Image: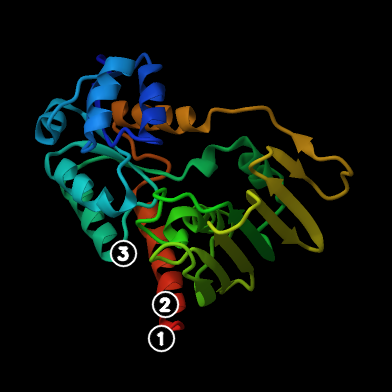
Amino acid sequence: MKNRPLQTGIVGVGRFGSRHADKWLSFDNVRLCGFYDIDPGVQKRIPETKNIPFLPLDTLIETSDLIDIVVPASSHYAVAKVALEAGKHVFIEKPFTETPEQAHKLCELARKNGNIVGIGHIERFNPVFLALEKNLPGVPDRLEACRQGPFIPGIGVDVSIIFELMIHDIDIVRRLIPSTIINITAEGEILYSDKIDRARAVLHFVNGSSAVLFASRAENERRREITCSLKGNDYTADLMNRRLLLPGNSRPLDFGFHDAMADELHRFSKAVQNNQRHCINEYDGLSSVKIASRIEKIILSGQH
């Protein structure tokens, strides 16, 4: 596989999957051999605009070395299960699955068949987050994260805001506070969809650290921000505006545009070619899904 392009297929080429397709098409080590999508309009548009053939799902999986899964989150498990059972490597957009039980089953399938799995926690490739991680002199005493924006009908509403947006910050918390969670409190609201649209969770850890996570698809203002407090100093990463404010600095460090999506997909393709575990793998996905599920259950149980 090192000496030939990776035969890659995409399942789901809508709003987000179309961007994935553009990245795959730009890589020398990948050949985008086809796509599958249930939308007739997409089936017609993608061959015309990107010159990628539409293939039935079973044919696409059979033809490919690697399957990129960019369908709605509620379909992640079903598509990934079929691809893993066929012995294919898979990249799955976040969240990994809807439930810990589904995540466990995919982990077992990947282990059994020797598949390489990648999860789309794209913020790990954001240069602002990487700079935050590099500049932190230790584990934060407290972390606060806000990830919010307006409600967009039909976008991400097949899962709660916890699995749609907060899952990013759950993954970041796992990275920056490598300690066991001892307690979670949470509250939330169902406002525009039939899932939780606004949520706040507080996580307490064995080492004494805490994390406060807020995520919402019911706000006018867009924000993507993380503040880490350590020994009385604050380190604030504005992920949306690409700025990092360090203690003692009156002016933030500004970062130019970085194509994090291209970075994560190319890194995964290299992991597959070198037969190496990806840096954000199925067990990372499982851990984040387990925490997200706990938060969701706490909120829903409080509403009855």
User: What residue appears at the point 40 percent right and 16 percent down from the top-left corner?
Assistant: 26
Pointers 3 and 1 in contact (CB under 8 A)? Answer: no
Left/right placement of residue 159 relative to residue 185 reads left
Kindly identify the amino acid type of the residue bearing the numbered disc 3: Pro
Task: Classify residue 202 by image quadrant.
Answer: bottom right
Mark identifier at residue 225: none
User: What residue appears at the point 14 percent right and 35 percent down from the top-left corner?
Assistant: 57
Of the two numbered discs 3 and 2 in the rendering, the one whose residue sits closer to the viewer:
2
Q: Is residue 6 visible?
A: no
User: What residue appears at the point 53 percent right and 37 percent down from the top-left corner?
Assistant: 125
Name the residue beneath numbered marker 1.
304
User: What separation in Å lies between label 3 and label 1 (alpha carbons)?
Assistant: 23 Å
Mark identifier at residue 300: 2
Q: Secondary structure at mark 2?
A: helix
Mark 3 crowd level (few <14, some 14–19, many ≥20, 10 Å Cα)? many
Pointers 2 and 1 in contact (CB under 8 A)? Answer: yes
Name the residue beneath numbered marker 3.
100
Q: How many marks?
A: 3
- Going from N to C along the chain, the mark reached first, 3 or 1, is 3
Residue closer to the observer: 46 or 142: 46
Q: Secondary structure at mark 1?
A: loop
Left/right placement of residue 200 relative to residue 143 reads left
Q: Secondary structure at mark 3?
A: helix
Q: Is residue 241 above or below residue 50?
A: below
User: What separation in Å lies between label 3 and label 2 (alpha carbons)?
Assistant: 17 Å
Task: Classify residue 218 by image quadrant.
Answer: bottom right
Residue 157 rendering spot, x and y as whole percentages: 39, 55
